[in-house]
Image: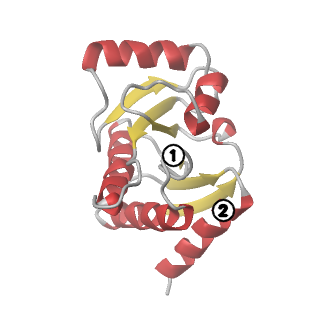
Amino acid sequence: MSRVTVVRGDITTQDVDVIVNAANAHLVHGGGVAAAIAVAGAPAVDAESRAWIDAHGPVPPGGAAVTSAGSMPADHVIHVVGPIYRDGQDNEALLAQAVRGALDTADRLEAQSIAIPAISAGIYGYPTEEACRVIVHAADTWLADGGRIDEIRLVAFDGETADHIRRALRTLGS
């Protein structure tokens, strides 16, 4: 049976098949989750990211790039581009599209477990509570639509984000 869980911790240390990187379209891992993943997976993640961009160009919204996880416990990193939060655009749809892109790609890789950070919260300016609600809803919808990953682990680096994810998960059961 599939489940969505929350973990407070470092996404780079999660013992799962796949971790998700909240990336930019050019896979330049300069800050936030992306920088932590690049450091922990060095040098493979950076080198494979550059090679992916050379071969395919920028990662489109809702698309995903896959690299190895280098020296991290996971097998792969799925790099997805979440929205930069802006008034006048459908931020929720764009974030849900990024989550579905990650989950669809993990499914194609036959992953049984995935760790997802709070995509777009942080340097992309998405309000954390709202981002967590969208991510939880997108994961739950993906599973309800037949998704086949055993564990979707939502990883929060800090306690406040973990609390937002927990509240969003509780609303699913209401």
User: Which residue has dot 2 on it?
Assistant: 162
- Residue 120 horizontal/vertical position (percent): 47, 49
Q: Nearer the viewer, residue 141 or 16?
A: 141
Cβ–Cβ under 8 Å for marks 2 and 1:
no
What kind of element bears circle 2?
helix
| Vertical order, 24 against 113 (above or below) | above
Residue 1 in view in this figure: no
In this image, 49 relative to 54: left or right?
A: right
| Vertical order, 58 against 8 (above or below) | above
- Residue 135 horizontal/vertical position (percent): 45, 60
| In the image, farthest residue toward the bottom | 174
* CA–CA distance in space, label 2 to label 1: 17 Å
Q: Nearer the viewer, residue 58 or 137?
A: 58
Q: Earlier in the sequence, mark 2 or mark 1?
A: 1
In this image, 31 relative to 140: left or right?
A: right
User: Which residue has dot 1 on it?
Assistant: 114
| Vertical order, 101 against 43 (above or below) | below
- Residue 141 horizontal/vertical position (percent): 35, 66
Quadrant of residue 164 within the rendered picture = bottom right
| Vertical order, 83 against 35 (above or below) | below
Front: mark 2 or 1: 2
Could you tell me which residue is drawn at 42 percent across and 60 percent down?
A: 139
